[in-house]
Image: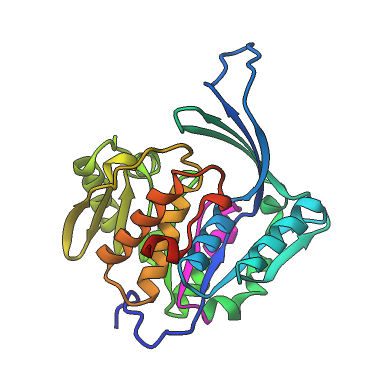
Amino acid sequence: MSKLDFTGKTGKPIVVVGSLNMDLVMRTPRVPVGGETLTGHEFSTLPGGKGANQAVACARLGSRVRMIGQVGDDGFGKTLRDGLAADGIDVSGVRTSSVAGTGVAMILVEDIGQNRIVLAAGANGALTAADIDAQASVIEGAALLVVQLEVPLPVVQQAIAIAHAAGVAVLLNPGPAAPLPEAIWPQIDILVPNESEAALLAGIPVSDAASAGAAAQIFRQRGVGCVLVTLGAQGVAVIDAAGERHLPAQVVKAVDTTAAGDTFIGGLAAGLVEGMSVDAAAALGQSASALCVTRHGAQPSIPYRREIQS
């Protein structure tokens, strides 16, 4: 049976291994040039981090979710844990570091909706493969493992290895983009990069559905089962054993693209574990992402399933 056949896995959680950050968000008319001081708009402190965002998206779109990660012993860490728990996410796998503070993301959001992000990893960077080993039974009991690259690569590799050995499907969002060891590729069932991540990993330019398909074929030759390249306003390119397809994006007025990709992944993951086809799950992710970009912030912008259905 394919690992992407989720029959019999009803009730098993999606397990997300990844980052938890506090986002310090400044809205600005534009990005300042070097040496310039620019008067911005409002400032806000919002829960974020790719791992936590994806966990929230999975939960709000209908899935049972467990989060594995690390925060600092500080106010930001407590706020992040409490926020996940309020969305029904099991946070028993979220450790509190005694050596590092909670991760922080500095985010500038321009009036046109584009964002620019700088990360300070904090406790995310102090997570270890041994911490993942301590959660091995949680990963082995998952319907799907979701991972990103905002925690150290050895942590990601260990989580993927545990899942792969247990027959648990693995979804990797390779962001922020970084080279991956060859041994990891055949253990990835679903790869979801954006254009820049696909270009870096494949070694070719990626700017549209055709070039995304070419990059995806490189990933499939390395052993990945299914590739979805997110192309922003151009939609999503889907490439798997059934061939290549292009799913156009829904047209909306974007005010903030923060967490749009994470929301797409949450919808994709939630749809898959419900038994949807890859294309139908991707369409759910697109609908959720389209609603997300019409709102401000990371986790505050992630929609609930009922909002999409209405």
Residue 182 place in picture, x, y as percent: 40, 55
Camera-side residue of 2 and 258: 258
Whether residue 194 is in magenta: the answer is no
Q: Relative to residue 117, is residue 8 drawn left or right?
A: left
Residue 51 image offset from top left, x and y in percent: 56, 57
Task: Pick whichever, 301 or 159, lies toward us.
Answer: 301
Q: Can residue 183 be seen at all in this image of the molecule?
A: no
The residue depicted at 67 percent of the width and 74 percent of the height is: 134
Identify the residue at the far top of this view.
35
Check if residue 147 falls in the magenta segment.
Answer: yes
As drawn, 79 above or below 46: below
- Residue plotted at (59% across, 58% down): 52
Position of 137 relative to 178 (above/below): below
Q: Which residue lies furthest to the front in this view?
A: 310
In this rendering, does residue 139 appear at all?
A: yes
Q: Which residue is drawn at 59% across and 81% down?
A: 137
Q: Give the range drawn in magenta.
A: 141-157
Q: Is residue 230 left or right of residue 67?
A: left
Q: In which quarter of the image is the N terminus?
A: bottom left
Using the rendered view, name the quadrant where residue 296 is placed: top right
How many marks can you see?
0
